[in-house]
Image: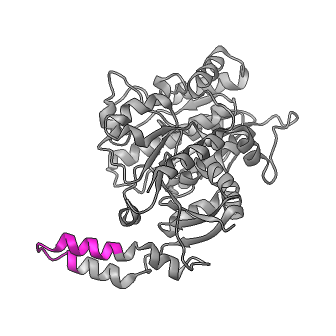
Amino acid sequence: MNKKNILIIIYRGSAELDWILPVLYKFSSEYNIFTLFNNEKAYESLKKNDQLYKIWKSINFSFYVHSKYDFLLYKLLRKILTTIKWKFADKINEFFSNKIHDLKNVNNKFFKNNKNLNFDIVFSEWGVHSGWLNCIKNKLFIVHYPSAPRFLINRKDRNIKKDLGKPRLDGNLLLLSFLKDKKSWSNAINEKKIKYCGIPKYDDWWINKIINLNKFKKKNINDKKIKILLSLNSLYDQKLSQDEILKFDQQFNQIFSVIEKLEKVKLIIKPHPVKNHPKYLKILENFKHLNWEIRNENLTKLSFESDIMLSWYNSAAIIEGLVAKIPSIELWHVSKRFYGNYNSSVFSHSGLSVLAKDHLNLERLITTAIKTKNAKIWKKQFKKFDSIYGIKKNKSEYTINLIKKERKKFL
């Protein structure tokens, strides 16, 4: 029996594949997996994540990396004609956008075995409204999924409606990591299209697959170096004011200074797959006695190899440290423009992370984590994680069955 086909669209990079890959892995026994990368940066981001890339490559049937030179004539005509202010500008933009994002053209030019190629299911990260989706919505069955294991929260200083913005569902199904989020989403989206499935990437079988791929560097009891994992965000490529640049510089200097002072410590830096401007490397050059290395492997794997997790403010990376059951500290933020005017993040407010208020507090927390791994503060953190996330087995299998069931309803 011939396999059916699945298409996944990747817009920014490896983070979009991390959540859904265990589902695709299991689907690959019944379906051919095709991948469309919206740009070259997205593909390069995946290649840097060794574990995800190897697993993806083992199940992927064919892929296409959209280049800025592809369909160049259509792009040039769209740009020229839409700059003219006339009443047909919107229709012209739509016409050329449909030409650029026509999957039939992509199939014919780039995908192998393209004869009569049809996609039974299309996966696309929630919140991205692209030309690709605009061309296929209402024609193909589209599944939206989250790229991070974060959740919504009601609190006095945070407007949940503002967090949601004005949600629009281009596809047919929205998968949620948390059941309690469904009520908030259903105020804006048809509840019948919203389904809770948990977090497939935290299935035991998948975690074991990730951490045992290639050489897993187990914590050596004879190695007295404490490994501190820093899940790093670097926003220098944004349009920053001089004051913001100085604040970001200061924060990096303070973080590296705190760690440099600690004895028998190694800093493992895991750059964000997108927010990774290299200026922080220049700052690192000032710390001659800091033992550090950059690793682009899967964050789950790195967490299991480390002793302490440091994550950026309001980053879901903190959860990876908790999955590995290591003390996980969230860094303070220095920009209200990027992180909002809140005293705590979603994770620290919920008791999942321990928030370092400044560099002095960070030093005290790291020292506590080194000296007292079983301190009450960390036990409380792990207990909170178990109560909120309630990691259960076979969420990937559950998600597949759910998708198949909803797919049958699509005409």
What residue is drawn where x is 66% and y is 21%?
Answer: 368
Q: Position of residue 271 (x, y in %)?
A: 57, 51
The quadrant where residue 365 appears: top right
Residue 362 seen anywhere in this rendered image of the structure: yes
The stretch drawn in magenta includes residue 91? yes
Residue 68 vertical placement versus 169 (above, below): below
Name the side, left or right, on which 369 lies relative to 110.
right
- Whether residue 206 is situated above or below residue 384 in the rendered picture: below
Q: Nearer the viewer, residue 286 or 33?
A: 33
259 or 104: nearer the eye? Answer: 104
* Residue drawn 73% across the image and 48% down it: 210
Task: Look at the image and tell me whether residue 201 can be seen.
Answer: no
Looking at the image, how many numbered discs can be counted on the residues? 0
From this view, report whether residue 98 is shown above or below residue 269. Answer: below
Is residue 48 within the magenta segment? no
Q: Residue furthest bottom?
A: 73
241 with respect to 385 (left or right) = left
The residue furthest top is 376
Residue 140 pos. (x, y %): 44, 61
Quadrant where the N terminus sits is bottom right
Q: Position of residue 264 (x, y in %)?
A: 75, 35
Q: Nearer the viewer, residue 95 or 371?
A: 95
162 or 373: nearer the viewer:
162
In the rendered image, the vertical position of residue 311 relative to residue 23, given as above or below: above
Q: The C terminus is located in which quarter?
A: bottom left
Residue segment shown in magenta = 81-98
Question: Outermost residue, left direction?
Answer: 86
Pinpoint residue 286: horizontal percent, then vertical percent.
58, 49
Prevailing secondary structure class for the magenta stretch in the rendered image:
helix
Question: In the rendered view, how is the structure colored?
Answer: one colour
Quarter-of-image position of residue 385: top right
